[in-house]
Structure formats: structure tokens, C-alpha cells
Amino acid sequence: MGCGESFEGVAVGADMYHQQNVKAFIGPYCNAEMDAVSKMAAFWNVPIIGYMAASNVFSDKTIYKTLARVSLRTTNSLALAVYSLIRHYGWNRVAIATNTGPMAFERTQAFEEIFHARKITVVKKLMFEENVDSKGMMASGYLEDLRNSARIVICLFSSTRESTKEFMQAVSLSGLKTHEYVYILPWLQAEAKDASPWIGADGQMVQNVKEFFTGSIIIDDVNGFDNTILTPFKERVESNGMSVEDLNLQNIYGYIHLYDALKLYSLAARIALNETNGNPNVTTDGRYLWNKMRRMTFPGLVSAEGVSSGQVTSSHLRSADVFMDDLAERAAIYAAFYVAPNRDDVMKMVEMNPIPTPNCDGVINKSGCFELRITDLLTGFWPSTDGHLPPDEPACGFRNERCDYTLMIVIGILALVALLGVGAGFIFFRVLENRALAKTSWRIFRDDMRIVSAEEMKSMLSIGSSKTKLSNMARFAKHHAVIGTNTHASFHLYPQRRPISFIRTDLQLLSMMKMLVHDNLNPFMGIAFNEKDELLVLWKFCSRGTIQDIIYNESVTLDSKFHAAFVRDITLGLEYLHMSPIGYHGSLTPWACLIDRNWMVKLTDFAIANCIERWEKSGYVTKETLKDGEDKSGATQLTNVLYCAPELLKNREQNRRRGMEQGWLKQSQARRQAGDIYSFGIVMYEILFRALPFPEGTDLTGKFADKEFSELCEYVRDGSKTFKPVIADRSQIHPDIIALLQDCWATNPEIRPSIRRVRLNTENYLKVKGSLVDQMMRMMEQYANNLEKLVQERTGMLEDANKRADKLLNQLLPSYVANELKLGRSVAPKTFKSASVMFSDIVGFTTLCSGSSPLEVVTMLNTVYTGFDDLINKHEAYKVETIGDAYMVASGIPQEIGVRHLMHLSDVALEIMAFLKNYEIPHMKPQKIRIRIGVHTGTVAAGVVGLTTPRYCLFGDTVNMASRMESNGLPERIQISEAFKEALQKHYPEFRVKPRGKVELKASFEIFGD
């Protein structure tokens, strides 16, 4: 349903309900018709969803009981956004600028209700006539009332675009658009998405209109004032087979809201059907569906990033979702946009996201039960000294009524009484000052200094032979002096026509220059004058030259840390100068930025330029002379005008043309500081882009064959024309830094930022900690730490490898032998007089193998011998080797242990038998293994045999006899020789043995068994 005349939509709605049996409504479009149709829908108890009507009256659900709304911008939600912004910045007092007419009245009433409920005081309401222009607004006298009553102004006009433009023009012409005032523009519009008010019919920016809005804050939905909706919306329309030509893109919000309204109804109806087991009547139950729409969240068509795909991306409230509040009205995401100067676009300063309030009933509280959480996206942007927005009331009140001047009057009287004493003290001070100035601590006599020749200087320079397209190395080599014994200085040389007579301000300036000390200021050594017809201005020598020599040296790699450090050092030096008694630099250029041996930038040539110009005008000196055939027309001699602010160039040109009797025109300190900011902007451009601020292709050789460069300098010399660098590639630099550069280059010195603001902005976006030497030290420390960590890791790996090698070696050889070999000692063969040897063999191994696979045999032997190994490790015994099913163990070697080998080997044999009683063959369970064991004791020879695979081998009759004991033994019996039995009975009688009888071997022995 759309808008019609004479409530045509109301009639259509009634006809649809009664004649066409329509039981749900989307629309109408207009507030007036929505009022009537939604009341009828409440009477009929049918659902109705508004998608464009923005009036705040529709929030009263005691009247509009079945109405839900999905529009992004409603009056009451925008009022809540304005309140949230006001509270965020700590304001409590505001003024409202509005006009007569029902629409403006309704908007103003909605905002006043929100403010009143939340303790925001409306101190002034400026009520202009409807459709009044800027002249009429100024003539009304209301703006003067505003000056004396408020600093925070909210603009609520019937025609948001046109009337607001007239109002902003009126306050600009009335002098009320300063950084002390904040103008908040809630962007309530009848149409869906109008262009910005400073965009003309041809789509181009109207500069004078843009200036009226500069410094204001516009509050709109999060997609306001950009193209995040229009372009993606066209793409989605075309991707669905429709033509953009068939749509009225001025009504883009109407299409988006209609989409969301249909989706809201369908989702609520689905929920209702599911809850009622498919009862079709529930889809027309207006109050029931309205309750289902409360606090509903679903994917909408628009997100904070533009037109979305409609897919949910996370589990909580997302910017791509439509969040319905407790009154079934859309809680939109709003943002505040700052209209910055020198930018075509606006800057998003804060974003406001709805956060539901738990345990809240919107019908009872008459609210949507949500708050807006504000996220700061931009800080320090306001054109004030500290970058912060102003308070809602001056500290002394609008008429200074809060400041008590009694104390000031008393102080004035006391000051007047003490005037004579102060005068006497001042005279005394001036006498002392004159004496101090007469000492001229800054004067350097030619006898106390020595001019260094170019050949001698070249051997001192540490910067080598590298040259750049604007190198100052020749100047450093030829303008060098040594003061005293070892103080190196560079100097400027001016031919002197007649003796210089210093005025008082000159003496004060030179004394202050001498006393200035800062890490980023190059010390002023002094001047030599009235000798040899030359004036020399001397500064401390910096070994690495100028910034130009570094940034234009292609062999030097400069990353962002270098850029940030250079810019930071310059801003720190400038800030100190601006806060010092001198108050300005006066001739900031790249060759006035020196680099010392620690890679720290030091500003030189400060404050003296104006004195030199005046001395030239007075005939004391002539223009600076370069030595030994240097070209006076060199680039640095001419291009200083390209770094000088236009207003200072005009002043310089006026002084050049004035007669001696007319006096010398001086610039205020504020203008000189603004001129430093202009020069800083050009220098920062060169640092960041490593490019000259001259047109590409300009001749920089000094010969000027085509006169291009000379003409460029003459073009700007008198200050009537300006030249600014062109920023071609913006991709590598933050947009706010680009904007800062453009602010620094502003022709109007009043709008250039202060050095403090420049420093804060550059530190925010060009982050660097400490000096470049500190950066290098941190990098070296990090490298050392990484290297130490690497050494520890490699040492750990080596230790692990050694442990594995030791373990393997101990498995191949006895521990004692392995340790001796690791220590580099040889292990000679040795005869052990008393040792014991044991052999074991599996009974029926051949038959067992014939019924098993090779892998099963290997698995069986591995589990059996692993068990044997664990038993042997508990005793002082050594497994010599395993050959197939044969297992050989010895004790008493390679370390002699007395007769304990008898006990240990007996224990091993008994434990092996006990182990096998509980062991079952894995692949033949429950079958068990039966073995024979033979033991003998006697003399044994042992030693390491072989190099490739060394083995510790045993030799002698004792070994052979032990083998015969096993081969002639009985299954599951331990057969020992008579010698072993006698020794065992003698030393360890607790072991029991049983004789087997005589068995025929190669030699006759009596055999004993267990």
C-alpha cells in the first residue's frame, strides 16, 4: 500500500479487508495513512508491518497494537541515537534549531520527550519560519540568542536537506561556526537516500556549500553518506534477472524495507504455525504475530557493510541482522559522521549498535528495551588545541557570570600599588640584561676558529662518496670550520659590506638561540662578524648530512620505521621551538634537517633567517656566498621559496620593495608557526614518498637550460600563487595522514593544525618507539635471543642424540666397556679367573617354527627375550648374545664381582623358569614354551671383537662346558656342572640342587639339576 490523496490508502485498506478478504498488511507508505490503517488493523486484530512511516507516534502499542516497523530511520530511534551521542561526550545542555510546520513540530516533540526522560536539558529552541532562507534566519535575531545560551545545537527542520543548508550558511556568516560550537544534524529525510547536501545536480561537490557544513556532525544509519548500499543493491538486482532501469533508485530504502517486512512476516508466521501445529488462522492473528515479532533477530538485506547476502554469520546479534526491539520495531545501527575540511568524503567518528536490555517489558515501559553501545572510531579530530570536542557550556558561563573577578580586581590594585617597585626592579633587570647581552656569548672570533679545506674535510666525512639528485655534500665539505681545539661546525658565509650594528631584539634572539638545548635541535654555535669583511653563521656539524642526502640516496633502504622516526624527530623539534621564547623556526627545509651519527634528526638554521633578510635590506651583508666556484643558482638556493608559506612570501616581498624609511614589516608569532606547519607538510611529503615536491621532469642540474625550474621558483616567489605537491599513489599511506598533509598545505593559515595536533596525529599513525639506534639495538637483541634459543635447541638435540647413541652402545656392549670406549680408553682382552656362563635353548623350536609364520616366530622371540632382558637388568649379569633360539648370559664380567656371579646367575636362571610358566605363545594360546638351561663356572677370556659391528665375546672351556650343559640338559630343567654346584654350595648353601647322575660328554662330568 502506498500514499494516496484524501486517505485513498485508508479506503483501499478497508476494501482489501472486507471485499478481498486480505488479513495482513504491508504499509502504507505515509505517516497519515499509516495512522488510520494501523488503527483499523488493531481493531480487526490483523497484522500490519510498516516499512517507511517514520513518525514516533507509532511506538505507542496501546493504540497501534498489531503494528511492527522495519524502517532503518524512525524519528524516535534517531532521537535515541542523538541522545546516546550527547551522553557519550558528557553533554547535558543542548539547543534545538527547528521551524514551524507539522513535520518539524512532530520531530521536535519526539526529541524533547527523549531528552526530558533522560535528563537532557533543552536550554533554547530556535523556531524559524518554514522555508525561511539564511538571510531571514540571521535577521530573526535567534542566532544571537544562541551565542549566549548553548554550544551544542541539534538541527530538526521540515526539509532536512535544504533548511539545514540555509541554517549552516546563516551560522557561518554570523561567526558562530567555530570549534566552540557543535552542530548535530539528525538526517531525517522524506525520501529514501538523498545525496549529500553539498553534492550538486551534476554529481559534483559544491565547494562553498561544503564549507558551510564543515565541522558539523551528521547522524544517519551506518550506511549513510557512502556507496555501501547503492552499488551492491544494483548488483543483487541484476543477479536476479531484473533490470535496474525498472526501479526508482531514489527509493532504494523503500525496496530494502519492503524486503525486510516480507521476511519478518514470513518468519513470524512460520513460528506461529509451528507452535499451533499448522493452524492457518494464527497467521492472521495480529496480536499473536506481533508478540512473535518482539525481540526477533533475522538476516536482513542491509548490513553495516552494505547490501548483505542475507546469510547469518555468527551466533549473536550481527550487523547483518535485523534486530526487532521489545515493541516489534527495528533497532537500527546508527553512526555519527564528521564533516572534515579539505576532504570530499565524511569521516565516520562513532558507531552505535543496539544492545537488548534484559528483564524489560517495552509495553509497560513504553520503550524498545535496548540501549545503544557507542564505539569510538575517530579521536583527536576536532579542530581544537587538544583535538577534543568542546563542553556544553563555557567554564565561566555564557556571560562570564560564573567567574568571580573580585580577586582579579584585588590583584590589579595590588599590582598598581607595587608598580613603582616592579618598575625599579625592571630597570635593574634591564641593566643586568644589557650587561649580559654585551658579553655576546654567541660571538666567535676568527682567531678562535679555523676554516677546514675541502680536501681535509672529505677525509673526515663518514657518508662516503654517495651522491643524490639534491646532494648537499659539497656544501658540507667546503663550509666547515673547527672552533677551538676539536669542535666541528658548518657555516653560512655572507659577504659583509660594513660593520653590523645589532639592535636589542637581535641581541635577545641570538642569546636565546645560544641557550636553546633539545635532542632534536642542532646547537647554534654563534656568529663571526666585523672581521675579514665576512659574516659567518656557525652551527654544530652533523656527520650524516641532511635528510635529503638520505632519502634521495638510492643505496639506502628506508622502511616505515625510518619514515616515522624522521617525522617524529622533526615534530618534537618544532614543538619545542614553538613552546620556547623564540616561538618559531622560520626556514624549515629538508636541508635544514640534519642527521647526526645516531640517526637522529636535528633542526638547524632556525630563527636567523629574518635577521639575515633585514641585514641584507640594511646593507650590512649581501646574499649568501658559496665557496670555491659553487653555483649560486643551485637547487637549494632557489627552492627555499617552495617550502615557504604564501603569506610569509608576501611579507618578504613587501619588505623587499619597501624603502628604508618605511620600516620593517613583522609577522606575528602565530603566523610564523603556521608557516612552519606549511613547510613541515612539504618536508613530510618528501620523507614519506621519497619524491621531490616539484613537477616531474623539472631540471635540477642548476644550469636551467630550459628555464623550467627557475620559472617554477619565480612563479611562487611573491606569494601570490601557490604550488603544492601532487599525491599520485595513496595506497601506501594512511588516509588520515594524507588529510593531515593537505591540512598543512592549506592556503589559509587559520585552518592549519597546531604542531601539537600534528605530532599527536603522526604518532598515532606512524608508530615508532625510541630512536633509530634504539630500534637497531632491539633488533640486535632480538637476534641474539633467537640465536641463544637456537643454540639451546641444537644443544638439546645433540644431548638427545648422545643419549640414543649411549643407549644403543650399551645394548651392544656392557656398560663398563661402553663407558671406557666413550672416555677414549682402550679395552684390552682380559682373562677372568672366576665367572659364570649360562646358555638356554627352546625345546622343539624347529617343530614350533614349522607351524608358524616367520613374523609370528619373530614376534614370539621378541616378547620372550624382552622379558629375559628385564630380568637380567635386575642383577649383575650381562646378556652376551642371542642366536636364533639360543640365549647366552654371563656374570662376573667385564667387571669382577668376587663370587656373587654364582648367586646372580642362579637367580636369573630360576626367574627365567618362573617367567615361562606364565608365558603363552601369542599365536598358539594356551601352549607354553619349554627351554633347557645349562650353567658352568670357571675361567673365561673376554674382549671386544670387530670394528664395523663390535661385539663383546667370551672364550674358553668354561663357555664350551656351559654350552654342553644346555645341549645335554632336560626340558624345563636347569643343568649345572659339578664345579658350579660345589662353588654354589660353599658360598650360597640356601640354593638347593639335585644330582642327575653321570652323563657322557667329551669329558666325564657329574651333572646336577635344579
Image: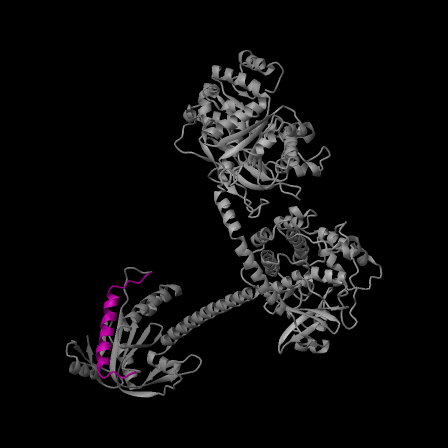
* Vertical arrangement, residue 824 with respect to residue 884, above or below: below
Quarter occupied by residue 452: bottom right
Is residue 108 covered in magenta?
no
The region drawn magenta spans: 895-922
Please identify the residue farthest to the right as the structure is shown.
Answer: 705
Image quarter in which the N terminus is found? top right
Residue under the point 32% across and 88% down = 830
Image quarter in which the C terminus is found? bottom left
Residue under the point 60% across and 67% down = 435
Residue 143 position, x and y percent, is 60, 31
Q: Nearer the viewer, residue 750 or 917?
A: 750
- Compared across the picture, whether 893 is left or right of 619 comes to left
Residue 842 position, x and y percent, is 30, 71
**Residue 553 visible in image:** no
Residue 330 position, x and y percent, is 51, 30
Residue under the point 63% across and 15% down = 5
Residue 498 position, x and y percent, is 76, 68
Q: Nearer the viewer, residue 151 or 590?
A: 151
**Residue 502 visible in image:** yes
* Vertical arrangement, residue 231 with respect to residue 410, above or below: above
- Compared across the picture, whether 720 is left or right of 518 comes to right
* Vertical arrangement, residue 906 with respect to residue 399, above or below: below
* Vertical arrangement, residue 85 with respect to residue 590, above or below: above
Chief SS of the magenta region: helix
- Colour theme: one colour
